[in-house]
Image: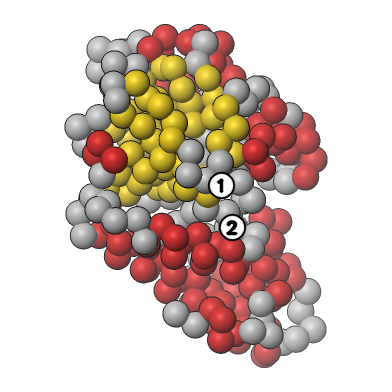
Amino acid sequence: MQVTDHIHAIKIPFAVSTRFVYAYLIYGKKICMIDSGISSAKEKILGYLKQTGRAPQEINLIVQTHSHADHIGLSAEIKKISGCKVAAHGAEQAWIEDIEEQYRRRPTPTFRSYVHDSTKVDWVAKDGDLLDLGDGENLKVIHTPGHSPGSISLVYPADGALFSGDAVPLAGGLPIYSDVFVMIQSLRKLQTVKGLQALFSSWHDPIQGEKVYRTMDEALAYMQKVHEVVRKENAAAPSLDSRELTIRVLMNLGLPESLLSPIVVTTIEAHQKVGQYPSILTL
Ligand SMILES: [Zn+2]
């Protein structure tokens, strides 16, 4: 669906849960894609381009907010069709260019069904870079680690838009990050970006107007809540291992146990690591 003058959002549901991911298209003279979704979304994305009078060959840049499988699923294929460049932060490059390495280090159960091929990164982006989109427009790179070391967010001034990948947790949703402090710092960095009118996250439906900044406030408050639940459950039963503790935390947050996975356990362990400094997290 078209959300702003230039930005189109494609919602890609996951087969195994109620969760989803978004891929975004910025329509100018050429097309810039922000993340490419999962491999099974090929027909949906190509169909959307056709239906809106555009062609995949017009895509000249894919920007990866980070390397996880649900964000790079179609990058290799679209690059093959269009000859586009792929941009990503240097800290994500290895996992995009070698998906087997990513799978070895982060073996998510759905990995194989989400991505099939590695993709070469042509443009190693860093904080403050401006990615030229042609037409005098650009994307400004903001390094927002925490969910992953090289997560980036992108400001598109032409439409007052921010693309945040997985850097803004969904309040009430599954918390996934590997470093609590760094994640909070990144969220606070995003809160300082002025003049935003639209937020395009991978975990939220597109958000516009005053809700943009409120969503970031809610994300921080949710991280605080998760932290308090982890501390409480940990204190109540200090002998629990990380997996058992994570199950208790999920239940306390009202999330089903079926969402338990090693990556959520990592989040809970990250909160445990800052347990002795609770005041630092207080908002
Ligand atoms: Zn991710």
Q: Quadrant of residue 59?
A: top left
Q: Earlier in the sequence, mark 1 or mark 2?
A: 2
Residue occupying image coordinates x 25% and y 12%: 53
> Element type at marker 1?
loop
Which residue has dot 1 on it? Answer: 151
Above or below — where is 113 with respect to 191?
above
Instruction: Give the position of the C terminus as an image quadrant.
Output: bottom left
Instruction: Give the position of the N terminus as an image quadrant.
Output: top left
Residue occupying image coordinates x 72% and y 87%: 237
Numbered disc total = 2
Q: Position of residue 175 (x, y in %)?
A: 54, 62
Q: CB at mark 1 closer than 8 A to ligand 1?
A: yes
Q: Position of residue 99 (x, y in %)?
A: 71, 31
Q: Quadrant of residue 75?
A: top right
Label 1 amino acid? Ser
Above or below — where is 235 with respect to 201?
below
Residue occupying image coordinates x 48% and y 26%: 62
Q: Quadrant of residue 122?
A: top right
Above or below — where is 248 with respect to 144?
below
Q: Nearer the viewer, residue 237 or 158?
A: 158
Q: Are marks 1 and 2 in contact (CB under 8 Å)?
A: yes
14 lies left or right of 122: left
Categorize mark 1 by other alpha carbons within 10 Å: few (<14), some (14-19), many (20+): many
Q: Position of residue 98 (x, y in %)?
A: 73, 29
Q: Nearer the viewer, residue 149 or 102?
A: 149
Which residue has dot 2 on it? Answer: 146
188 lies left or right of 229: left
Label 2 amino acid? Gly
Q: Disc 1 and disc 2: Cα gap in Å?
A: 7 Å
